[in-house]
Amino acid sequence: MTISTKAGSPRDRVLIFDTTLRDGEQCPGATMTLEEKLEIADLLDAMGVDIIEAGFPIASNGDFEAVSLIASRVKNATVAGLARAISGDIARAGEAVRHAVRPRIHTFVSTSPIHLAHQMRKTEDEVIEIITATVAQARNLVEDVEWSAMDATRTSIDYLCRCVEAAIKTGATTINLPDTVGYATPDEYRHMFRSVRERVPNSDKAIFSAHTHDDLGLAVANSLAAIDGGARQVECTINGIGERAGNAALEEIVMAIRTRSDVLPYETGINAAMLTRASKLAAAATSFPVQYNKAIVGRNAFAHESGIHQDGMIKNAQTYEIMTPESVGVSKTSLVMGKHSGRNAFRTRLGEMGYDLSDNQLEDAFVRFKELADRKKHVYDEDIEALVDQNIAMAHD
Ligand code: KIV
Ligand code: ZN
């Protein structure tokens, strides 16, 4: 599909499928309590996430209970439960999501030669039969069935097309083509979506979905490339937590689409002003700290220390910020005072702290500030207060 980027042209909606509570929780050490999961699910729903993957019901009784409770309380989003291509898994997932306003069963099977030979020990034809049987079983339980080709990016395109065709024919409404091991490049991933959609009969009967992992740091770039290739659902997690190096970060995808709407003619239903809150909640629940320089939600995402940048920011925030901190729920930009800070930022900070110094006083204080900043890694407001007060006291002596 050719998409026009002309201003004012209609934008395609990209569905946001959040898997923080499933793939996110699968990363070592990120286990969450039931209460934490419920709190996260409520926030995701309020934030406008379209599909919440609440867990893997067959994995444990705790997971089953969490998915069932989330299914019963979520008001707007579709609630999905994950199931392997095994009858017992599908039945359990169906039971867990049955009270949801919009229930979904998400079932998957591996399709790559390496998984077929070493993990599944099945032939290609046997896997096609499994797809038909499991998607049919899921469709008997719910209307909304997502089928995933695990390790799609290391599967031959011919075989992948056969699998997708079987899944759509049997009633899958969403087709997910995951880059399970984070191996694809953006061009390859875009091309895979285009080819499958072009070659599979009735491909327009299903929504195509991207699910990417960050082993090569390409998860978000790959998700955006998949959208360009026709995917209209992206699977992601808050803070990008997930197996190994993680999944695509929800906040990065949402803000890339929003900030670069000139070249990405799409929209999501996410209330971006809630992203920082979601990030803090997920970090606290999983005990996974957010790296300082993490895009969008890291502590430094809206912080500036260099003199040149601080000077530009004081004159016009757009000089060094491509989105406003308020747009993602941060109250304001922070100009961090350190050895790279310049006079203008120092004067502005003093003004914010209530000081009104003469030019000479300011100059003296600035020299002392630079000496201090050379010795100390962080210069806090209290340090500035101390050196200015000392300066003023010396002037009175
Ligand atoms: O990475 C993956 O392939 C998955 C599937 C279960 C969708 O998480
Ligand atoms: Zn995954």
Image (cartoon, grey):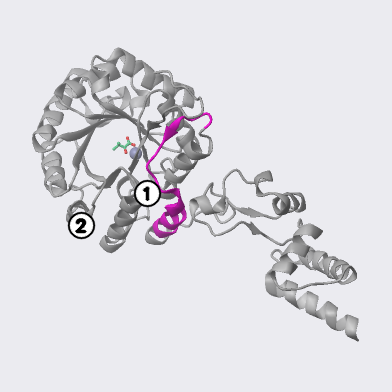
Q: Which residue is mark 2?
A: 62
Residue 220 coordinates in the image, percent (x, y): 46, 36
Tell whether 131 sits left or right of 351: left
Q: Residues within 10 Å of mark 2 (few under 14, many from 20)?
A: some
Tell whether 44 sits left or right of 374: left
Residue 231 coordinates in the image, percent (x, y): 36, 28
Which quadrant would residue 280 be assigned to in this image? bottom left
Does the magenta-highlighted stretch encompass residue 149? no
Q: Amino acid at mark 1?
A: Cys
- The residue under the point 37% across, 55% down is 30
**Residue 27 — which label?**
1
- The residue under the point 12% across, 32% down is 139
SS for callout 2: helix
Residue 130 visible in image: yes
Q: Amino acid at mark 2?
A: Gly
Q: Which residues are magenta?
A: 262-282
Q: Residue furthest bottom?
A: 397
Quadrant containing the C terminus in the rendered view: bottom right
Residue 291 visible in image: no
State whether residue 388 is above or below residue 1: below
**Residue 48 — which label?**
none
